[in-house]
C-alpha cells in the first residue's frame, strides 16, 4: 500500500515536472517570437529612419546586393538599404512606418497576451491606413515618390484612369472619413469636446502656474523639475489613492490597466500609456480627470492612465431613456406623421353650402305696425288687470317676437302667469307663450308669433360663422333662436337626443337638419349613422351615402332599417359594439372615445392588438313609438343600455316620436335623454311628457321647437331643409369614392335564428293553424305578415313562426329575406296537419 502511494507520488511529481517543463518551453518559445517581432520592428524602424539620409546613395547598392565589395550607407547596411527600398521606395512610402507598429503590436500581443481579436483589429486598421496614406500621398504629392511609394503612385494612377482627378480626391476623402469615423471614432461632439478639453486644461494650467508663481513655495520648485516616470505616476496615484498603495502594486495595476483600457475601447493609443515624464500640466490633467470620474473611482486602473491635456477625452451626454411604447410611438409619428383616419378617402370633398337653397331671400322683416299693435294690446290687457308696466322691449325672431316686460314694482309674477290665457285671448293669436320670469334676466317674456314668419334656411345655418368655426365633436346647427342667432350644439355633449312632436310639425325636417349638419362637418371616417325608418320614406335618400356614412349589420342588403324586427338585432349588435369599444378603451387606459382616438392618432395604440380608429356612431330612430308598440321590451332594454352607457364610447342616440305618451317615453328613457327637442304637440300632457313642463302645446308648428337640456328651455326655429336639397347633398357625397362597404357592426345571433326548435304539438299557439294558412296563402314566411293579419304583437308572431319552422312548414331564418314556405297550397297544408295528428 505504502509502496503504491510512493509510486503514485513519484508518478505525479514526474508528470507535474514534465508539465512545468512543457509550460516553461512554451513560454520560452512565446518570448522568442515576441523578441523576433520586437527586433523586426527595431530593424525596420532604424532602416527606415536611415533611409531618409542615406537612401539616395544606397539606390545603386540595392541592385547589386549580392556584391560583397559594395558597402551601403544605411545604418543597418545592405539589409537596411534593401528593406528601406523595398518598403518605402517600391512599397508604400512613409506609411511603411506603420509596419513597425504592426510588428511591435504582435510582439506586445505575445508578451501581454491580449485578445487575438484585438490584434486582428490593429493589423486590419494599420494595413487600411497604410494603403489610404500611401494612395493619398501618391495623389497629393506626385513629386516626392518616397512619400507615397511606388504602390501608392501606381494605385493612384490606376484609380485616376477610372475616376479622374476629382473622383480620386473624393474617394480618398471618403476613405479618410471612413477611417476617422470607425477607427478613431471621431464625431462632431468628440471634436468639440477635444477642443473644449484642451482649452479648459490650458486655462487650468495657466491659473495653477500663476498661483504657484505667486506663492513662490517649495512645491513650485518640485513640480517644475521633471521627475522620473515612476515618481511622476506615483505622485499622481498617491493623490488619487490616499497614499495607500505601494509603487509595486501600482505598477502591476498599471500594466493591467493598459490592456483593460484598450478592451473597453477607450480612445487611448499605446504610446500614451508609456510613462513619459509628465510635466506640471500632466499632473493637473490627472487630477481633473479623477475628480470628474468620481463614480468610476472604484476601478483604480482608470485613474492610472496619465492623460495629457491634448488627449481626446470624450464626455458623452447620456440622454433620458424613454419608455419603449412612447419611444416607438414617437418614432412612428416622426417617420410617418400622426395617423390620419381620413387617409383612405383623402380626396373626399365636403358638400358646399351652394347645394342648399336660400329659402328666405331677405332676412327677418320687421313689421313696425304689427309690433306697435301687439305692444298696445299687451299693455292694455295687463292694465285691465291692474298690472302696470315700467318698460317693454321687443325682440323680433324668425317666427315669433319676444316682448320683454318689466312690471311696476310690487307686482307679483304669479299674477301675470295666471293671466296667460287672457293675454292670449286679447292678442287673438295662437302660440303665445309666457315666460315668467325669463331666467337670468328678471323680466317677463311674452312670445307672440309673427304674422309672416320667416323660413330659416339650412344654408344660412351651415354658412354661419358660429357653425363653421364650431370646435365641437359633433356640431349640429339646429336653427335660429328668438334673437335670430344660429343655435349650434354639440351632440357628443347631450349625449342623446329625444325628439317629439305631433305629426306634420317638423320632426322629419328636424332630423334632416341634424343629419345635414353632420354631413357638412364630419368626414366619413369620423361618423357613421345607423338609420331606422319604419315609415320607409323619410330617410331613404340617405341610402346613397351607404358606403360613406352608414353602418349596418353584416349580411344585410339595405343599410337603412325599415323592418322593425331587424331593429332588435341592430340594437343588440350596437350593444356588442359598445362592449367591444369599452374593452378597447380599457386596454388603452383612456376614459372616452376622444382620448382614445387621440392616442390612436399619435400611434400609441397598436392596430395589431385590435386597436382601430373609432368613428362616432349615431343611431337615428324616426318612429320610436311604432317600435315600442311592436317590439316592446326587446327594444327598450338595449336602447336603455345604450343610452346609459354609450356616451363615453361615441354611440349617440337620436330618437323621434309622434306619440310622446308615457308608455313610449318611459321613465328609464327619459332619465337618459336629458336633451330633448319638442315640436308642437297637441296637449299639455304630451308637453309635460317631453319637457317635464308646458310650452310645447303652445308652439306654432312648422319647425317651431323648444330645446331643453336640463333646466333652460330655448325656443328655436328649426332650419328648413327640403327633400330635393337632401337629395343633392347625398348625391354629391354618393358620387364620390366611398369605402367598399358600409361600416359593419358586430354580428348578433338573435333568438330568431335559433333553428333547433322542438316544439310539442300540444304547446302550439291557438292561432297556429290560422297562421299557417296565412303563410301558405301568401307564400311568405314573415312574422310581420302575421302581426298585420292576425293583429298580434311581435313576440307572439315570432313565436308562431318558430313553431311553424319546427313543424317544417316554413324554412329557417334567412337574414333580410322572408323565410321560404315548404307547403305550396292550403290542401297540402290540410293534409300535412292531419297526418301530424295521426
Ligand atoms: N323648419 C321648418 N321651416 C318651415 N317649414 C317647415 C319646417 N319644418 C317643417 N316644415 C313644414 O312642415 C311640413 C311637415 O314637416 P315634417 O314632414 O318634418 O313633419 P313630421 O313631424 O315629420 O310629420 P310626420 O310625423 O307626419 O312625418 C313640411 O313639409 C314643411 O312644409
Image (spheres, rainbow, N blue to C red):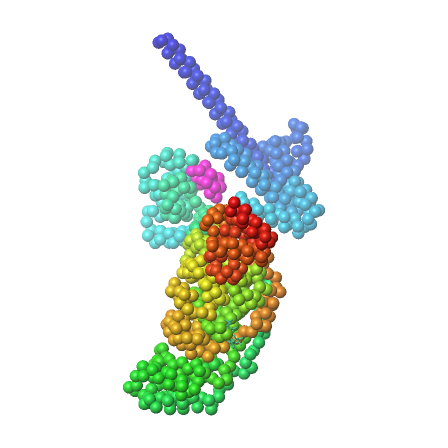
Q: Position of residue 718 (x, y in %)?
A: 49, 75
Q: Is residue 403 above or below residue 312?
A: below
Q: Position of residue 158 (x, y in %)?
A: 69, 44
Task: Identify the residue shown where x is 53% and y is 77%.
Answer: 457
Towards the viewer: 271 or 825: 825
| Residue 309 among magenta residues | no
- Residue 805 seen in the figure: yes
The N terminus lies in which quarter of the figure? top left
Q: Which residues are magenta?
A: 257-276
Q: Position of residue 546 (x, y in %)?
A: 57, 62
- Residue 340 seen in the figure: no
Task: Identify the residue shown where x is 52% and y is 28%.
Answer: 33
The reply, left or right, for residue 85 in relation to residue 415 is right
Q: Residue furthest left?
A: 410
Q: Is residue 49 above or below residue 737?
A: above
Q: Is residue 808 above or below residue 570?
A: above
Q: Position of residue 289 (x, y in %)?
A: 40, 47
Amino acid at each position: 500500500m505504502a509502496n503504491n502511494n510512493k509510486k503514485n507520488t513519484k508518478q505525479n511529481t514526474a508528470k507535474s515536472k514534465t508539465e512545468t517543463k512543457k509550460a516553461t518551453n512554451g513560454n520560452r518559445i512565446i518570448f522568442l517570437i515576441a523578441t523576433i517581432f520586437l527586433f523586426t520592428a527595431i530593424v525596420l524602424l532604424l532602416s527606415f529612419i536611415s533611409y531618409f539620409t542615406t537612401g539616395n546613395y544606397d539606390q545603386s547598392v540595392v541592385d547589386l546586393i549580392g556584391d560583397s565589395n559594395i558597402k551601403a550607407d544605411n545604418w543597418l547596411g545592405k539589409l537596411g538599404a534593401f528593406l528601406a527600398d523595398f518598403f518605402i521606395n517600391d512599397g508604400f512610402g512613409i506609411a511603411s512606418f506603420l509596419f513597425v507598429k504592426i510588428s511591435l503590436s504582435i510582439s506586445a500581443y505575445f508578451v501581454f497576451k491580449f485578445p487575438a481579436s484585438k490584434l486582428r483589429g490593429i493589423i486590419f486598421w494599420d494595413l487600411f491606413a497604410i494603403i489610404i496614406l500611401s494612395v493619398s500621398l501618391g495623389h497629393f504629392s506626385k513629386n516626392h515618390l518616397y512619400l507615397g511609394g511606388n504602390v501608392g503612385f501606381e494605385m493612384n494612377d490606376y484609380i485616376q484612369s477610372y475616376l479622374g482627378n476629382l473622383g480620386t480626391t473624393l474617394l480618398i476623402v471618403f476613405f479618410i472619413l471612413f477611417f476617422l469615423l470607425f477607427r478613431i471614432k471621431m464625431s462632431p461632439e468628440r471634436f468639440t469636446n477635444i477642443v473644449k478639453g484642451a482649452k479648459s486644461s490650458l486655462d487650468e494650467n495657466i491659473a495653477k502656474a500663476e498661483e504657484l508663481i505667486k506663492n513662490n513655495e517649495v512645491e513650485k520648485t518640485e513640480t517644475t523639475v521633471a521627475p522620473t516616470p515612476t515618481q511622476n505616476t506615483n505622485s499622481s496615484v498617491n493623490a488619487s489613492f490616499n497614499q495607500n498603495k505601494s509603487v509595486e502594486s501600482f505598477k502591476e495595476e498599471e500594466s493591467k490597466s493598459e490592456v483593460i483600457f484598450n478592451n473597453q475601447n477607450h480612445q487611448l493609443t499605446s504610446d500614451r500609456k508609456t510613462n513619459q515624464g509628465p510635466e506640471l500640466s500632466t499632473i493637473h490633467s490627472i487630477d481633473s480627470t479623477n475628480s470628474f470620474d468620481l463614480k468610476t473611482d472604484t476601478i483604480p486602473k482608470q485613474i492610472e492612465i496619465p492623460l495629457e491635456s491634448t488627449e481626446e477625452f470624450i464626455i458623452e451626454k447620456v440622454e433620458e431613456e424613454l419608455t419603449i411604447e412612447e419611444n416607438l410611438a414617437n418614432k412612428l409619428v416622426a417617420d410617418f406623421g400622426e395617423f390620419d383616419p381620413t387617409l383612405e378617402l383623402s380626396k373626399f370633398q365636403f358638400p358646399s353650402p351652394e347645394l342648399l337653397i336660400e329659402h328666405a331671400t331677405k332676412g327677418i322683416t320687421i313689421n313696425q305696425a304689427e309690433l306697435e299693435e301687439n305692444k298696445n294690446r299687451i299693455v292694455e290687457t295687463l292694465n285691465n288687470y291692474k298690472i302696470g308696466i315700467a318698460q317693454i322691449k321687443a325682440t323680433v325672431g324668425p317666427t315669433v317676437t319676444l316682448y320683454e316686460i318689466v312690471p311696476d314694482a310690487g307686482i307679483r309674477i304669479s299674477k301675470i302667469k295666471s293671466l296667460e290665457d287672457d293675454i292670449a285671448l286679447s292678442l287673438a293669436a295662437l302660440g303665445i307663450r309666457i315666460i315668467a320670469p325669463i331666467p337670468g334676466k328678471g323680466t317677463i317674456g311674452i312670445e307672440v308669433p309673427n304674422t309672416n314668419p320667416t323660413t330659416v334656411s339650412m344654408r344660412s345655418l351651415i354658412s354661419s360663422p358660429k357653425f363653421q368655426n364650431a370646435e365641437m365633436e359633433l356640431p349640429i346647427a339646429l336653427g335660429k333662436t328668438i334673437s335670430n342667432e344660429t343655435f349650434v350644439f354639440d351632440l357628443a355633449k347631450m349625449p342623446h337626443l329625444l325628439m317629439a312632436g305631433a305629426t306634420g310639425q317638423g320632426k322629419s325636417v328636424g332630423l334632416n337638419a341634424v343629419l345635414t349638419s353632420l354631413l357638412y362637418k364630419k368626414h366619413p371616417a369620423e361618423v357613421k349613422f345607423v338609420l331606422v325608418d319604419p315609415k320607409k320614406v323619410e330617410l331613404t335618400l340617405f341610402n346613397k351615402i351607404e358606403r360613406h356614412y352608414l353602418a349596418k349589420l353584416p349580411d344585410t342588403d339595405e343599410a337603412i332599417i325599415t323592418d322593425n324586427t331587424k331593429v332588435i338585432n341592430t340594437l343588440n349588435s350596437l350593444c356588442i359594439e359598445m362592449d367591444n369599444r369599452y374593452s378597447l378603451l380599457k386596454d388603452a387606459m383612456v376614459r372616452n372615445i376622444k382620448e382614445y382616438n387621440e392616442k390612436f392618432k399619435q400611434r400609441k395604440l397598436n392596430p395589431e392588438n385590435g386597436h382601430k380608429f373609432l368613428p362616432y356612431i349615431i343611431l337615428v330612430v324616426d318612429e320610436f313609438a311604432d317600435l315600442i308598440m311592436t317590439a316592446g321590451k326587446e327594444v327598450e332594454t338595449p336602447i336603455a343600455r345604450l343610452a346609459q352607457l354609450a356616451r363615453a364610447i361615441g354611440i349617440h342616440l337620436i330618437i323621434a316620436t309622434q306619440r310622446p305618451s308615457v308608455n313610449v317615453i318611459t321613465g328609464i328613457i327619459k332619465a337618459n335623454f336629458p336633451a330633448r327637442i319638442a315640436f308642437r304637440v297637441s296637449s299639455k300632457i304630451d308637453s309635460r311628457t317631453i319637457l317635464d313642463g308646458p310650452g310645447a302645446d303652445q308652439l306654432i308648428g312648422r319647425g317651431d321647437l323648444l330645446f331643453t337640456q336640463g333646466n333652460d328651455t330655448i325656443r328655436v326655429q328649426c332650419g328648413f331643409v327640403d327633400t330635393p336639397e337632401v337629395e343633392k347633398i347625398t348625391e354629391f357625397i354618393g358620387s364620390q369614392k366611398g369605402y367598399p362597404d358600409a361600416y359593419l357592426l358586430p354580428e348578433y345571433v338573435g333568438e330568431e335564428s335559433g333553428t333547433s326548435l322542438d316544439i310539442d304539438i300540444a304547446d302550439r299557439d291557438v292561432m297556429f293553424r290560422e297562421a299557417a294558412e296565412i303563410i301558405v296563402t301568401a307564400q311568405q314566411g314573415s312574422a310581420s305578415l302575421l302581426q298585420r293579419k292576425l293583429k298580434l304583437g311581435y313576440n307572439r308572431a315570432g313565436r308562431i313562426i318558430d313553431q311553424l319552422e319546427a313543424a317544417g312548414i316554413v324554412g329557417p331564418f334567412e337574414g333580410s329575406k322572408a323565410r321560404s314556405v315548404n307547403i305550396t297550397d292550403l290542401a297540402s297544408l290540410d293534409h300535412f296537419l292531419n297526418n301530424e295528428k295521426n
